[in-house]
Image (spheres, rainbow, N blue to C red):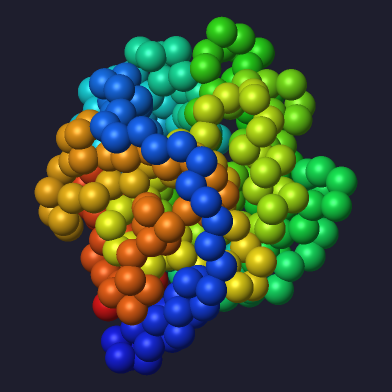
């Protein structure tokens, strides 16, 4: 774990480069619809559940998704059963689950955020390299490798779930590193001809314009990239290194610990905009903002984790 001073200094240095590049804002929508708000809050709870070890220990017949820390009540109140889990991979420790929500007719793929030293190494691996998502598409190699390690098992589990629940809506979600991996997963699922909605929270940038625009424009499901106030993670890797975001952004402007309303969330379009999370002072970072979106996302891992703690 980095000492607080050096960790903050490193983040500030990286983020200072982000102000070098600017791009005009395409569209702005102040206050979101009630349906969008309800979905953002719900799928953040599925992402939160990926931090809970009990949900990553699937037995024959599946296991009901629960959060002992009480931060996924909407999920727990539904009939949600995890049908596949993945964890402790050799290189990146990518972890998460595939679950079926029988109450809402959903199949949900959720990825956990950074929690282990191997996760953190994946985060810090800034060099880009090739992917097989689209022609000429390069990406952050740490995030890409995390998806590649989970890919075969995840896609097989989704195929099995689709056979028994063919009418389910497919959702891909994750927080932090989990959101970055979710980007790749959603892109690949959509390429196979399956519509999938993508919900991420506090996710970093994963690629340059070619791949980010490809995912933005797939038109096989909605993109809901959610950020919070001065969360530093969505500002990394820096714009100056050629990284941009998937569009649109749903920006939460409330202070830490305050549950946002629909009126507190603004939708910004464009791979780069300076009015949402990126537009905040790069020297004004708040690690606590990374952990709180609609609740404390990583609460299940608070005693064990490596998740961007101060």
Horizontal side, residue 10 vs residue 149: left or right: left
Counting from the top left corner in percent of width and height, residue 272 is at: 53, 54
Q: At 15% from the left edge and 43% from the top edge, which residue is drawn?
A: 259
Placement of 147 over or under 90, stated as above or below: above
Q: At 27% from the left edge and 70% from the top edge, which residue is drawn?
A: 286
Q: Is residue 145 in sight in this rendering?
A: no
Q: At 82% from the left edge and 59% from the top edge, which residue is drawn?
A: 130
Q: Residue furthest right?
A: 135
Q: Quadrant of the C terminus?
A: bottom left
Q: Quadrant of residue 30?
A: top left
Q: Quadrant of residue 166?
A: top right
Placement of 298 over or under 34, stated as above or below: below
Counting from the top left corner in percent of width and height, residue 124 is at: 57, 75
Q: At 75% from the left edge and 30% from the top edge, which residue is drawn?
A: 191
Of residues 3 and 267, the one nearer the viewer is 267
Of residues 295 and 106, the one nearer the viewer is 295
Of residues 117 and 132, the one nearer the viewer is 132
Horizontal side, residue 281 vs residue 123: left or right: left
């Amino acid at each position: 774990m980095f000492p607080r001073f050096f960790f903050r200094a490193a983040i500030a240095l990286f983020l200072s480069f982000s102000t070098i590049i600017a791009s005009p804002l395409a569209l702005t929508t102040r206050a979101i619809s009630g349906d969008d708000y309800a979905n953002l809050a719900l799928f953040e709870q599925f992402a939160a559940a990926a931090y809970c070890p009990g949900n990553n220990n699937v037995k024959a017949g599946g296991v009901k998704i629960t959060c002992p820390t009480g931060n996924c009540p909407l999920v727990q109140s539904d009939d949600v059963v995890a049908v596949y889990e993945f964890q402790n991979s050799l290189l990146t420790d990518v972890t998460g689950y595939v679950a079926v929500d029988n109450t809402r007719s959903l199949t949900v793929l959720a990825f956990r955020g950074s929690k282990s030293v191997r996760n953190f190494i994946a985060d810090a691996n800034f060099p880009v390299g090739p992917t097989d998502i689209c022609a000429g598409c390069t990406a952050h190699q740490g995030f890409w490798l995390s998806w590649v390690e989970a890919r075969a098992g995840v896609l097989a589990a989704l195929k099995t779930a689709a056979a028994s629940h063919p009418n389910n809506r497919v959702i891909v979600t994750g927080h932090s590193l989990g959101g970055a991996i979710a980007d790749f997963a959603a892109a690949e699922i959509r390429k196979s001809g399956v519509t999938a909605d993508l919900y991420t929270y506090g996710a970093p940038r994963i690629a340059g314009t070619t791949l980010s625009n490809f995912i933005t424009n797939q038109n096989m499901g909605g993109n809901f990239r959610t950020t919070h106030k001065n969360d530093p993670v969505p500002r990394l890797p820096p714009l100056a290194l050629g990284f941009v975001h998937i569009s649109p952004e749903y920006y939460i402007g409330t202070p830490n610990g305050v549950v946002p309303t629909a009126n507190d969330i603004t939708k910004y379009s464009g791979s780069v905009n300076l009015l949402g999370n990126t537009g905040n002072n790069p020297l004004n970072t708040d690690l606590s903002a990374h952990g709180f979106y609609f609740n404390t996302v990583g609460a299940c891992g608070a005693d064990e984790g490596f998740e961007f703690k101060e």
